[in-house]
Amino acid sequence: MSPLQKLAALIGPARVLRLMRIYPPYLGAGVRVRHAEPDLSRVEVEMKLTRWNRNWVGTHFGGSLFSMCDPFWMIMLMTRLGPGYVVWDKSASIEFVRAGRGTVSATFVLSEARVEEIRREADRDGKAFPRFEVEVVDNEGQRIAKIEKVLYVRRAGQTDAVRAAPGS
């Protein structure tokens, strides 16, 4: 268990996420968790435009937009599945829709039904590759970017070479 996972077990994952504003990459980029449900079923993140995350033409740097959204699906899913599952990032992409100015935000929602669907797939097939999308929007609700993440999920203690026997 990582030090952050230990801290989350001690004070709760939602509080750890709110503390991420002092995590050096997020501190410099101006990313902050605006709200996190205690069970991490919903997380809201925002980023103001600052001199530290501004690009050559005065809008949000694309890497900062991606960074703002990078860890949340993985953290939310690993917390919701519990210690019996391993969750890793597998792939990601970002589509830039329009220039981001001012404060931008993203809202991540992970339903219990989706968590159970992923759990069943990982249990049945030995692993799962759930796909998630989130939109980054500006203060007027205009879409700035769309980010897609694919995660890798399997039961803890099981490797890719070891598959669960059918019916077990």
Image (spheres, rainbow, N blue to C red):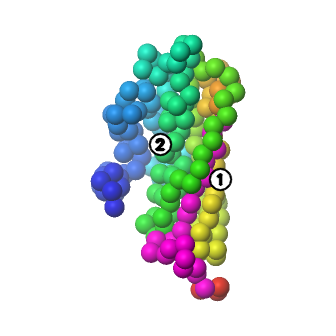
**164 within the magenta span:** yes
Residue 166 in the image: state x and y as whole percent.
65, 85
Residue plotted at (69% across, 27% down): 97
Q: Badge 2 local density, few (<14 within 10 Å), some, or many (20+)?
A: many
Q: Nearer the viewer, residue 106 or 160?
A: 160
**149 within the magenta span:** yes
Would you identify the image quadrant in which residue 98 lies?
top right
Decide: is 127 above or below 17: below
Magenta region: 146-165
Please identify the quadrant where the C terminus is shown: bottom right
Q: CB of mark 1 within 8 Å of CB of mark 2?
A: no
Q: Nearer the viewer, mark 1 or mark 2?
A: 1
Residue 31 in the image: state x and y as whole percent.
45, 30
Q: Badge 1 local density, few (<14 within 10 Å), some, or many (20+)?
A: some
- The kind of residue on which mark 1 rests is Arg
Decide: is 38 above or below 51: below
Q: Secondary structure at mark 1?
A: strand
Residue plotted at (64% across, 74% down): 125
Residue 52 in the image: state x and y as whole percent.
42, 20
Which one is earlier in the sequence, the residue at label 1 or at label 2? 2
Residue plotted at (60% across, 45% down): 92
Please say whether residue 38 is visible from this viewpoint: yes
- How far is the residue under mark 1 from the one under mark 2? 21 Å
State left or right for residue 144 relative to residue 48: right
Which residue carries the number 1 mark? 131
Residue 73 in the image: state x and y as whole percent.
54, 49
Would you identify the image quadrant in which residue 21 lies?
top left
Q: Secondary structure at mark 2?
A: strand
Please say whether residue 102 is visible from this viewpoint: no
Which residue carries the number 2 mark? 36
